[in-house]
Structures are given as structure tokens and as C-alpha cells.
Image (tube, rainbow, N blue to C red):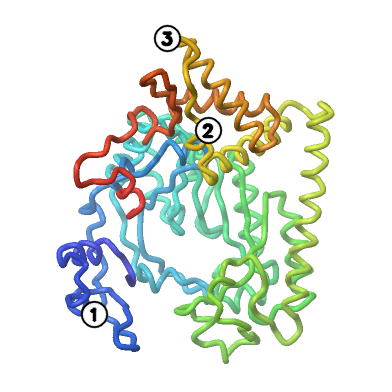
Amino acid sequence: MRGEGERTIAELMAEKMDPSAWEKVRGLAFRRNGGIVMTEPQPFIEDLDALPLPARHLLPLSRYQALGYSISIITSRGCPYSCIFCLGRRMVGSRVRLRSASRVVDEIEQILSYGIDRINVADDLFVSHSGRVREVCDEILRRALRFTWSAFARVNTVDRETLKLMREAGCDSVSFGVETGNSDLLKLIRKGITREQVREAVSLCRETGIIAHTSFIVGLPGETPETLKETGEFAASLGSLYGYHFLAPFPGTTVREEVQKYDLEILTDDWTRYDANSAIVRTSRLAPEEMDRFVAEFESTIDAAWQEMIRAYHKKSNPPGIDLQVEGHFRMNLVYRLLAEDLIEKVGATALSSSKIDGGSEEASLGVVCRRIEEVTGVNGALVRKTLRSLADSGFIKAEIAEKIVDWHWTHNRHVERMTKTPGSDPHMAPALL
């Protein structure tokens, strides 16, 4: 599917996915007889409010919530900016289309109704329209919704008044794409911002009680050892949280389609390498190995500090807030293993030791499950017990008792019983298709 997918999905379903009908479905690309067929483009959806709210109830939300991740929403589509490394304009166009503030907050209310209390606004341009941000924040406050959220922004569009209102409405962090600390490269990549604007935006976030994140790209056209050093010094001087990604010159981006105009060589078309986690380009003065080394040195400093926090955790010498971070990391890793290895499904059934079925039986069986998971994973027993107890208390896992067997399982979402299978349907198919 190319571009926006909602109408294309609907047209495919109307044709029952019949390959003989694909040519008349707009917005598709597919292979046929060794060749590539691209159908007529799907027009952009003008009225985004006409779209139904996402059917999140079809997803196994308990599993997402157990990991503690935020849920993302999109409040607008389209980007008028011309950064040479960005694919967004090819996907959603250059003209900005906005959802109404009331519709956005309707979706937020729906998300909160599932017991989710953290949201990420994933728009590239959410904070680029101060009037629109004001409308959304005012609607959140009018409905007295209490939750925390984060957003992406451009440094040249934020102001003190807007950030203050966002903070009042629950926003606690904002991420800025800065890309480089070199002024000439900022102009070359058509970012449309200055170093001074970056400093001002980070300062305003600090003043209004919002955490600022800044992200940078390594391997931009014309990158040199000097520009990398300048970026590193600039990033460290801001007083923000910051990190690096590697340039991924996707098909459809200006930098790839017009690569001959730039000091850049693309080294691979292996799309599995286009994850921004390693260098896949070179410039006339910088090899990919040097780019990798720059980021590795930065990450090694962070890792050394993290390892010290872990050692102090085991020695019980961390401040309480740091211990919470370390334990939260361990807990997330354990939950990830529970999910990835299907451990609840594998060891979650226990036999009742008596004919009496009560709350004690359920609690005793959870203790057995905890011991089994401790044996399988090697994770500290106290952490296993604390984690599974919290999952049960939150309604993410639940015990089902039948015929002297207590069977623990993941709930579909927070307060919903495990879906029952009806003739001709599979309760796991809806999440898989999404």
C-alpha cells in the first residue's frame, strides 16, 4: 500500500483480497508475472474527522500496558517543510490537514477509558501550529482529563505561552529534531532552523517544566570529522536529553533521489540495514566506520553510567529515584520475556491442592507460577513476585479456575475477560491482522 492506507484497505476488503481485482484498487503496488504494477494513487483524505477512531479494543492492550509503553495518536497529516532526509511528504503530502480539537480529545478520552494514562502525540508538526495546540489543550482542560503526554516539535515554532499551556494540560516532554550542530549542514539539509533557535527552545522547555529531548543525525551529506565534533559539543552544551541516529536514505527522499548533488555515497540497498542503527553511507571525508565509532563512544559513556547505577542498586547505595529507574528496567525486561517466550501460557496452569476453591487457591497458584518463572528465567524471585503481583492487581493477567486447575492467562485488555472463541472465528486473528 502506498500513501494513506484507510481507503485502500477498504477497497481491498470489498474485493475480498482477490488478486484479479488488484489493478482497480487505488494505492497499491504489487508483483505480477515478474513485473511491478503500481495502481492509480489514492487521493489524500481531506476530512480526517470522517475517519472512525482507531479500533484499539481489537488489540491485546493488556500486553502493551504491561510493558509500560505510551500509546501514540496522530492529530494531523501533511508536512510543508523540505528536509532532504524525510520521507513524510511522500506518504502524507505537503499540505497540512488537521483533525478538530474535539475529535482529537474524543480519541484521548477513549484511550484513557482503557486504563492507559500516558499518550505520545506522534505528529511531526503538532507544536508548529500554536493556535491549534491551544485548542487541543483548552479542550483537555475543559474536560478535566488527567494524564501525561509527550509531543514532537520544531524549535522555530515553540513559544513560552504555548509550552506553559501544554504543561498545564499534562505534557511533560517535547522532542526536537535538530539533526546537526553545524550551521552550514543545517542549511544544506533544508532544516530551516538555527542553532540559536535550538538553544532558545530548550531553555523555554526548562522554564516551563517540560523535559526537552534533542535528536541528531550522523552521516549527513558533507559530514566531516569536524562537523561531527561540532555536533557532539553542541548537543552536550544544550542541557537536554539527547541522542543520535544514522542517516537512512530511503527511496522517495530528496537525498536519495538527488544523491549526485551531494557529497554522499549510499553503500547498500539491503533494506534490513535501514533502521538508523548503523552507518550505511560515506562522505568524501568520513568513512562509515568513523561514524559508527563516534556513536559507539557516546553510547559507551552512557552505558558506563548505567552499569554504575546497577552496581549501586545491588549495593543499596542509590538514591530512591535512581533505584526506581533500575528496578523499572529489570521489570520491563522480565515482562518482555514473559511475552516473547509465552511464559504465562507455558507455566500458568497449576493443580489445586484441595477441593476448596477460594481466593487463597488463586494466590497459592500465583506463587507456584512465580517460582516456575524464577527457575526458567533466573530472575530474582522477589522481582518476579512483585512483577506478577502487579500484573494481577492491574488486571493484565487473571486466573481461571475449572476442574481443580488454576490457569493464569493474559486478559485481552484491562477489564475484559479472555475472548471466547465462537464457531468460525479466531479471537487472535483481529490483533494479528492489525
Q: How many discs mark residues in the rendered view? A: 3
* Horizontal side of residue 210 vs 294, given as left or right: left
Calculate the distance from the C-alpha at mark 2 to the C-alpha at mark 1.
Answer: 51 Å
Please tell me whether residue 285 is drawn above or below residue 361 in the rendered image. below
Helix, strand or loop at disc 2? helix
* In front of the other: 158 or 94: 94
- Determine which residue is flagged by label 3: 355
Q: Which residue is drawn at 39% across and 20% down?
A: 401
Mark 1 or mark 3: which is in front?
Answer: 3
Residue kind at label 1, given as amino acid type: Glu
Mark 2 or mark 3: which is in front?
Answer: 3
Q: Which residue is drawn at 53% across and 16% down?
A: 364
* In front of the other: 216 or 29: 29
Q: Disc 1, disc 3: CB below 8 Å?
A: no
Location of residue 264 (image quadrant): bottom right
Please tell me whether residue 91 is drawn above or below residue 328 in the rendered image. below
Calculate the distance from the C-alpha at mark 2 to the C-alpha at mark 3.
Answer: 21 Å
Q: Disc 2, disc 3: CB below 8 Å?
A: no
Q: Residue at x 41, y 55 (%)?
A: 129
Dot placed on the residue nearer the N-terminal end, 2 or 3 = 2
Does residue 170 appear in this view?
no
- Residue 347 is labelled as 2
- Determine which residue is flagged by label 1: 40
Badge 1, how many Cα within 10 Å: few under 14, some, many 20+?
few
Badge 3, how many Cα within 10 Å: few under 14, some, many 20+?
few
Badge 2, how many Cα within 10 Å: few under 14, some, many 20+?
some
* In front of the other: 139 or 364: 364
* Horizontal side of residue 209 vs 101, given as left or right: right
Residue extending furthest toward the left: 14
Dot placed on the residue nearer the N-terminal end, 1 or 3 = 1
* In front of the other: 99 or 399: 399
